[in-house]
Amino acid sequence: MNHPRRTREPNLEPRTANRTHELRTVNREPDSYLPHLRIAGVVIRVESGPDGPPATVDGASRAFVVDPCEADVRVRTAWGDLPDAMPGRLLFDSGGLWQLHERDGELHYSFRSPIFGRRPYRTASFDREFRRGVVTLDRASFAGRPPACPLEYPLDELVVINRLAFERGVEIHGCGVVDADGAGYLFAGQSGAGKSTIAALWAAEGATVISDDRVVVRSSRNGLTIHGTPWHGDAEFAAPVSAPLSRILLLRQAPRNGLVALPSAHAAALLFACAFPVFHDAGALDRTLALLASIVESVPVEALEFTPTASAISFARALTA
């Protein structure tokens, strides 16, 4: 079951200008807000009221900041005194940093870290369609520390995944590439399949790598598109770029390059194994399954056996020549 569950800790170091990713902060006036984030077409606006933590963004998400525009999701920040245990019905436990509860018709995330012990340092509450939410930071946890960014990972990813479930989109564990001719490739695979390797090979050949770990596929009347995300892998490719999807290739490292045809049902099952669906909502899960079925009927989906050399890129390019 795929969910954002990497155990990256919250960034609590003092933030200085000489860090690789400088913190971006908006003036803390009443109702000031972060310049909007657009990730895979989902626009998120974070508002900071006069008594809330500042609206900030850092890391790879800085590349996804856009000018103010109509938002799909609006999030407000607040300070609070968070309880040790969250009330409500437990829907999902990531086994790591976060849990999801349901209470009073809303969804409530709680985030913990060994740095703070058992107490949640952050919660986030959203309506069922992920249109509006409130992110609350625990006062005691951040006493004497700079506050965390409101949408610090994995919350930003959770918001996008849930909103995409209503907008014919799905996040896939994979590497996304846009070649010089505009062709978009999705190389899907679990950890160890070779996503970072294939990303580096494509980059060396002059292609644009939009992500080496998390790619969004969206469907519209104009066809299928792939979108980069801030949630990169070891190779750290993350670009706010989209392109028409030409082909999906499921990665398999092998002694030589080759292509294995897949029946539609098998291809959909393998793609689902690489997806990040919303498991707590049966309706959202059904929509994701239907989307994956339509994807495998719309573009070629095959298994790519490849060697970690530039010959794999030439082989892949020849498929659409």
Image: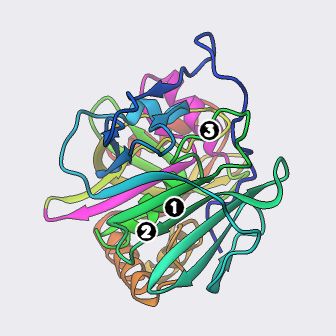
Binning the other alpha carbons within 10 Å of mark 3 as few (below 14), some (14 to 19) or many (20 upward) gives: many
* Label 1 or label 3, whichever comes before in sequence order: 3
Q: Is 8 left, or right, of 59 in this rendering?
A: right
* Label 2 or label 3, whichever comes before in sequence order: 3
Q: Secondary structure at mark 3?
A: loop
Q: Foreground mark, 1 or 3?
A: 3
> Which amino acid type is marked by label 2?
Asn
**Are discs 2 and 3 less than 8 Å apart at CB?**
no
Q: Which residue is mark 2?
A: 162
> Which amino acid type is marked by label 1?
Leu
Q: Foreground mark, 2 or 3?
A: 3
Q: Report, in whole angstroms, how far the alpha carbon at label 1 lies from the one at label 3.
A: 20 Å
**Are discs 1 and 2 less than 8 Å apart at CB?**
yes
Q: Quadrant of the C terminus?
A: top left
Instruction: Verify whether residue 271 appears in magenta.
Output: no
Q: Which residue is mark 1?
A: 158
Q: Secondary structure at mark 2?
A: helix
* Image vertical order of residue 89 relative to residue 275, above or below: below
Residue 117: percent from the left, percent from the top?
86, 56
* Image vertical order of residue 44 relative to residue 11, above or below: below
Q: Is 5 left, or right, of 35 in this rendering?
A: right
Residue 63: percent from the left, percent from the top?
41, 30
Instruction: Verify whether residue 210 appears in magenta.
Output: yes
